[in-house]
Amino acid sequence: MGNLIEGQTLIYERVDDVVYARYRDEPYRNIPRWVVGGYPEACERAKAKEQGDLFTYADWQAINEMARTNKTLRKTLEKVLDIYLLARDSK
């Protein structure tokens, strides 16, 4: 089963349609839980959050698509882009 620690019991947890596993007993219980399954979109979001991302690339594509017809979202994204460019240029 990959890199699992032999003889160690796992605890499975379901959060927001994502199934995680973690070790139950010491000294391994401090190892962070990891994604083992769930709905693909939910798993993708969970993995993005683990990596420190705000959202997935699919979310970003959907936001851009919606901004084509949603004036408020478009204006807000334009402001975000301006802030990003200012922050990037001030480094």
Image: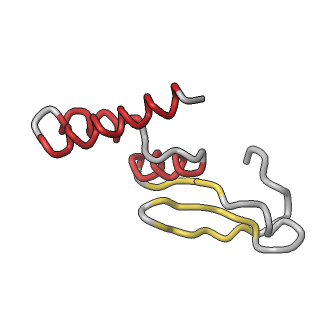
Q: Does residue 73 appear left or right of residue 10 in this picture?
A: left
Return the residue found at the far bottom. Answer: 25
Spot occupied by residue 29 in the image (x, y as percentages of width and height)? 79, 69
The relative height of residue 33 versus residue 87 in the rendered view (above or below) is below
What residue sits 43% from the left and 64% below the top?
A: 16
Q: In which quarter of the image is residue 35?
A: bottom right
Q: How many labels does the image show?
A: 0
Q: Where's the C terminus, which quadrant?
A: top right
- Given residues 25 and 54, the one toward you in this image is 54
Residue visible at 58% across and 54% down in the picture? 36
Figure colour scheme: secondary structure
Q: Write the residue at 46% across / 55% down.
A: 38
View extreme (right): residue: 27
Residue at the image position 27 percent from the left and 34 percent from the top: 78
Q: Is residue 48 above or below residue 68?
A: below
Extreme residue toward the top, this view: 89
Q: In which quarter of the image is residue 31?
A: bottom right
Measured from the top left, where is residue 9 in percent x and y? Answer: 77, 69
Front residue of 36 and 76: 76
> Residue 13, image x and y in percent?
57, 70
**Image side of residue 81 versus residue 26, left or right:** left
User: Whole-percent x and y of residue 15?
Assistant: 48, 67
